[in-house]
Amino acid sequence: MERYCFTEQVQAAYESLQQAFAIYQFVDKRVVALVLSDGFCKMSGYTDRKQAYQDADRNLYQNTHPDDAARIAGEAYRFATEGGQYDIVYRYRQTNESAYRMIRARGEHVYPEEGVRLAQIWYTEEGSYAESMKDGTDQPDLFEQGIINAHSY
């Protein structure tokens, strides 16, 4: 299967989006990035879009927490081969950061023309991730993320 190409105008419009957004295609049994928006680049810490595309093609999960990378890759493969919805939460950090943040990725397939299936993925930062010092396990700070509050016990 050949890599799908958008017109220059469509590519530029997608890339200028401030929402963290990407479009991928499953080509030769691997996921390739076709579009990485300005919002995606900013969230991921890229000032050079060309570098963002190169890193996405080399190792899409390079800044993902090691405990999450295999789970994300498995879900991405399932989504690419079986379809359905893509919805996953994982820990991510920018190259120049030491702290992880929680990211939610949600997506669906679109069909721009017959025989072409692309994955549109939206990314949302859901807060910082704090490693627990009490028991040595990685536990998200659910209060900080707003998932629970003092009244939800």
Image: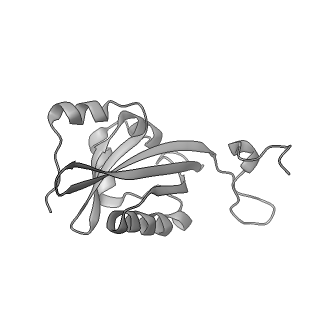
Nearest the camera: 84 or 130? 84
Label total for image: 0
Placement of 128 over or under 75, stated as above or below: above
Image location of residue 123, percent across then percent down: 47, 44
Q: Quadrant of residue 46?
A: top left
Placement of 54 over or under 66, stated as above or below: above
Residue at the image position 72 percent from the left and 43 percent from the top: 144
Placement of 47 over or under 72, stated as above or below: above
Nearest the camera: 84 or 78? 84
Residue at the image position 83 percent from the left and 47 percent from the top: 152
Image location of residue 34, percent across then percent down: 25, 48
- Colour mapping used in the image: one colour
* Side of 34 relative to 1 (left or right): right
Image quadrant where one finds the N terminus = bottom left
* Side of 19 relative to 14 (left or right): right
Nearest the camera: 63 or 105? 105
Image location of residue 77, percent across then percent down: 37, 67
Q: Quadrant of residue 32?
A: bottom left
* Side of 113 relative to 50 (left or right): left
Residue at the image position 72 percent from the left and 66 percent from the top: 137
* Side of 87 relative to 112 (left or right): right
Residue 26: tell me if it is visible. Answer: yes
Image location of residue 60, percent across then percent down: 37, 57
Residue at the image position 36 percent from the left and 68 percent from the top: 82
Residue 98: tell me if it is visible. Answer: no
Placement of 17 over or under 33, stated as above or below: above
